Image (spheres, grey):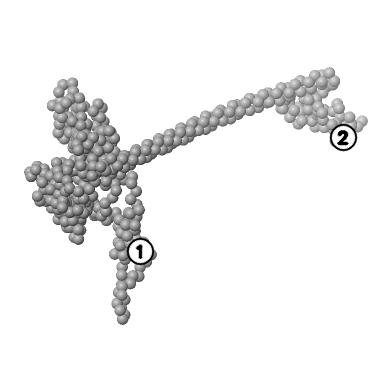
Amino acid sequence: MGSMNNFMSKFGGQGEDSAPPDSTLLSTGAPNALGAFMDKFTTLTESYWFYNHTEELRYDTEAHAYFRVDPELGNLIELHGVTNVLKIIDRSAALVPWGAKMVIEKLLRLVPLATTKGEFDSLMLAPLTLEDFTKIAMEAKTAPRDKLEVAGNIGHIAHKCLEDSIQYAIDHTKGIVRELHNIPTDEKAKACAEAGLAWMQAHNVRWIKTEQKIYSREFGYAGTMDGKALVDSCDDPSCCTEHFKDSLSIVDWKSSNDLHVEYILQAAGAYCHAEIEEYGEDIKNCFILRLGKNESEAGKFVPWRVPAAEFPRAFQGFLLCLQLVTLLGEVKTWISTQSKELREAKKKQKSEQKEINKMKAKVEREAEKAQKKLDRAVERERIKADAKANREAIKNAKKTNTSGNAGEDPSLAAENVGRPEPVNAIPGEAKDTKDAPMAPKVVAEVATQSGYEEAPIERKPFVIPEEG
């Protein structure tokens, strides 16, 4: 713990030496090193408090997500973001043709052209290989994204200028914006901000809040509204169809090319309900303002005023989107859980099959080993039986020789069992070979196979006796 404190102390907070006795990094109420480290490197913003300082929210600037801080455990509970909820509304019917138009325009800007000489000069496509054309087409494919990034940058810059100007007015001029502050150098962003100033001056706007976080504890969503102000009607009947003064209103700036229905659900629905839910205020109007962002629209605006009578319907539309997003999230979670369980089941099944195969191989090896052992035992018994049979045969042969022909070689009797009697092989010898002695070589072989040794045979030359 000491080494951790030493490391964390480099980022502020209490180090090892400053920690009170018997304390840990997170047990004291004083600022701690780990907290200082997290504050330095986390993407979460500072705390936002609601409902008389009883509900704490944090915002992740990278993930663009809101989190509620659990008052008991201190863990973060993700909330639904208003703009993310409204992305469920399909805008492809308008965006697809627009995207196709952007691609074609960029493609025409990129393809090389050549001028033909003749009676009338004209432009034609320059010679181009398929490979080069493919590269140009792939580059043109990014046109919608490039356009959105540029438009987003213009809107962000203009929005920042308006925010700074409104905050200055709240701090110094009782909420009345008399001039713009931090005017953008980009002409389109500047025109956009000037359009916002023109609307504020025409409606005698007195700002109460700007860039205000909102939170609905009842429905679990959060967001950031552009501002809340007191607004008067203007003299233009195309803008204000009825007269009102000091109308407490929610205001939301838009720098898009069109006014979309989800803007009403966002501002008149979600934002107004959250403010009424928390503060019980009597909000009369909601203004959604599309600001001009090019030279022809500089200083102009297209307003949508949504009266309080339309708030319930706008909020009902937002709730339907919220319910659909929640339902889709639950279904995705269910699918993810099922997929995980399926993967785990397959993994378990594979592991079990592997164990089964391993045990099967082990059993087969044991069976093979036992079979070999059994085969060796059988072979030994066969050899013993053969040897015993041989000994019995010799023994029987000896008995037969003793009882039948005392002068006959016992081994000869064993060898000749079952053999046919030979025909006279040597001229002059008797045909009856029953009592004829066995050849010495045969006697020796029988003796060797029978397990005993025959006494050496003395061989003498045959001598023909002389007559007389």
Q: Is residue 176 visible?
A: yes
Can you tell which quarter of the image residue 225 is in? top left
On the image, the x and y values in percent for residue 223 come to: 24, 40
Is residue 63 visible to the viewer in this orientation of the structure?
Answer: no
| Relative horizontal placement of residue 86, taking residue 301 as reference (left or right) | right
Residue type at the position of mark 1: Phe
Task: Name the residue rendered at 29%, 35% in the picture.
Answer: 219
Image disc number at residue 424: 2
- How many residues crowd around disc 1 within 10 Å: few (fewer than 14), some, or many (20 or more)? some
Which one is in front, 100 or 117? 100
* Residue at (20, 48) in percent of width and height: 242
Q: Does 298 appear above or below 344?
A: below
Indicate the quadrant where residue 30 lies: top left
Q: For the point 73% across and 24% down, which residue is it?
A: 390
As drawn, 262 above or below 338 = below
Q: Name the residue located 73 percent from the left edge and 23 percent from the top edge.
A: 389
Q: Looking at the figure, which quarter contains the C terminus?
A: top right
Helix, strand, or loop for circle 1? helix
Residue under pointer 1: 133
- The answer to which quarter of the image holds residue 330 is top left
In primary-sequence order, the first of circles 1 and 2 is 1
- Taking depth in this image into account, of 375 and 66 the one nearest to the observer is 66
Label 2 CA crowd tier, 10 Å (few <14, some 14–19, many 20+): few
- Identify the image quadrant of the N terminus: top left
Q: Looking at the picture, which amino acid does disc 2 mark?
A: Asn
Q: Give the x, y percent position of residue 266.
A: 26, 44
